Image (cartoon, grey):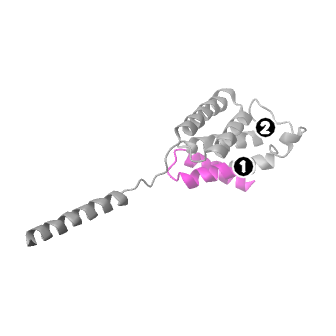
């Protein structure tokens, strides 16, 4: 009888310990939404081409804003923040092939040089905050210092 009782206690202990380990190993990382991830990646690819090849900085900002509003947890948000920050910076200096027309109501508030500089600082600061080891950190720091000095 004693052997059965001891065996039962050991079996019960094994079951309890095994089940408690299963519950303790929950996945803490948020699940990646494959549809949103794919859409964000597509927007980043388009923005990257617009930035590098076309110098279409307004287009980059529109793609970034759309993506960030829908999916701020995008796995490659670091590069997108860099492109948005630099696009804002370049537009504030009237660079690029897409010119700002402040006579249009929809561009009047969004694309003033002051607002663009403010956005550039915000995007690049967020980049550094979210990714302190970023490959873009040095350039972002340099632009932030320049813009804050103005």
* Nearer to me, 67 or 107: 67
x, y (%) of residue 4? Answer: 11, 67
Q: Quadrant of residue 44?
A: top right
How many angstroms separate mark 2 from mark 1 (CA)? 15 Å
Residue 38 image offset from top left, x and y in percent = 55, 34
- Identify the magenta region: 121-150
Relative horizontal placement of residue 19, taking residue 14 as reference (left or right)? right
For label 2, the residue is 94
Q: Quadrant of residue 145?
A: bottom right
Q: Could you tell me residue 88's position as x and y percent?
A: 72, 43
Which residue corresponds to the image point at 27% horizontal and 59% vertical from the top-left? Answer: 18
- Residue at x-position 56% and y-position 47%: 73
User: Is 60 left or right of 108, judged from the image as shown?
Assistant: left
* Residue 69 magenta-highlighted: no
Front position in the image: 121 or 36: 36
Observer-nearest residue: 111 or 20?
A: 20
Q: Could you say whether the residue bearing mark 1 is in a helix, strand or loop?
A: helix
Residue sitting farthest toward the top: 53
Q: Position of residue 64 (x, y in %)?
A: 66, 40
As drawn, the residue found furthest toward the front would be 1
* Circle nearer the viewer, 2 or 1: 1
| Residue plotted at (57% across, 55% down) | 129
Give whichever of discs 2 and 1 has the lower sequence position: 2
Q: Quadrant of residue 80?
A: top right
Numbered disc 2: secondary structure: loop
Secondary structure mostly seen in the magenta stretch: helix
Q: Circle 1 is placed at which residue position?
A: 119
- The answer to whether residue 76 is above or below residue 5 is above
- In the image: residue 108, left or right of residue 57: right
Asked if the stretch drawn in magenta spans residue 123, the answer is yes
């Amino acid at each position: 009888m004693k052997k059965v009782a001891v065996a039962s206690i050991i079996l019960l202990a094994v079951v309890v310990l095994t089940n408690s380990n299963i519950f303790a190993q929950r996945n803490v990382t948020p699940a990646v939404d494959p549809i949103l991830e794919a859409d964000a990646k597509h927007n980043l690819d388009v923005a990257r081409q617009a930035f590098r090849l076309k110098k279409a900085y307004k287009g980059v900002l529109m793609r970034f804003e759309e993506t960030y509003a829908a999916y701020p947890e995008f796995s490659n948000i670091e590069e997108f923040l860099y492109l948005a920050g630099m696009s804002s910076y370049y537009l504030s200096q009237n660079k690029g092939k897409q010119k700002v027309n402040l006579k249009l109501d929809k561009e009047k508030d969004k694309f003033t040089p002051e607002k663009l500089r403010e956005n550039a600082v915000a995007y690049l600061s967020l980049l550094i905050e979210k990714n302190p080891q970023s490959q873009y950190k040095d350039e972002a720091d340099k632009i932030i210092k320049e813009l804050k000095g103005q």
